[in-house]
Image: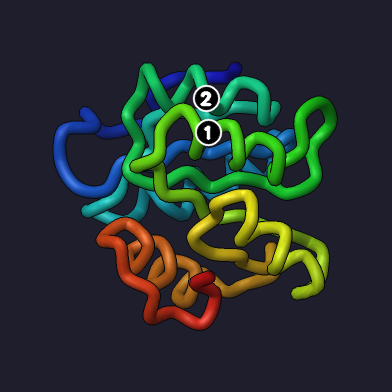
Amino acid sequence: MTGDCCGGDGSAGIRVLLVDDHPLVRRALADALSEEADLTVVGECDDGSQAVEAAARLHPDVVFMDLCMAGMDGLTATAALRTAHPEARVIVLTGEGPEVRPEAEVAGAHALVPKGTRLGPLLRCLRTVAVGGTGCPFCL
């Protein structure tokens, strides 16, 4: 696992855990989220197998989970995370098309977001999922 805390004290706002096997993707997402006053990236994992332990330790409000990763893939990691922590809210990030939507729903994801999504819609989805809403176009 890479750094546990990436800015902020983690005491206010929405706590986010990033899970992606590409360091540049994690860094770009962490940088974008750190610009938002109400968001704190509390940790980053480079493999889905690390997500359950990291979530138990870091208590994120929302987990961004890459779909395709070396090691444990995002759907398997999402299912394991939701089994261990049913309250966990998961947004699956994917380079795949909408055909993976049924599998993401079965795994327990709350949203399925294409990796090419612009920052504005991504942030709206994150905030919607964090409060238990389902009103964004990516919500499952």
The residue tagged with tag 1: helix, strand or loop?
helix
Q: In the displayed structure, does residue 93 sit left or right of residue 13? A: right
Which labelled disc corresponds to residue 81?
1
Quarter where residue 50 is shown: top right
Q: Is residue 117 above or below residue 27?
A: below
Q: Which residue is mark 2?
A: 52
Q: Is residue 32 above or below residue 70?
A: below
- Identity of the residue drawn at 52% across and 25% down: 52
Where is residue 103 shown, x and y percent of the image? 72, 59
Q: Amino acid at mark 2?
A: Val
Which labelled disc corresponds to residue 120?
none
The N terminus is located in which quarter? top right
- Identity of the residue drawn at 23% across and 53% down: 37
Mark 1 vs mark 2: which is more N-terminal? 2
Where is residue 136 shown, x and y percent of the image? 44, 79
Q: In the displayed structure, does residue 26 sit left or right of residue 3? A: right
Q: Amino acid at mark 1?
A: Leu
Q: Few, some or many C-alpha atoms within 10 Å of disc 2 (few <14, some 14-19, many ≥20)?
A: many
Residues under numbered marks 1 and 2 in contact, where contact means CB atoms less than 8 Å apart? yes
- Pick whichever, 30 or 20, lies toward us: 20
Where is residue 100 shown, x and y percent of the image? 77, 65
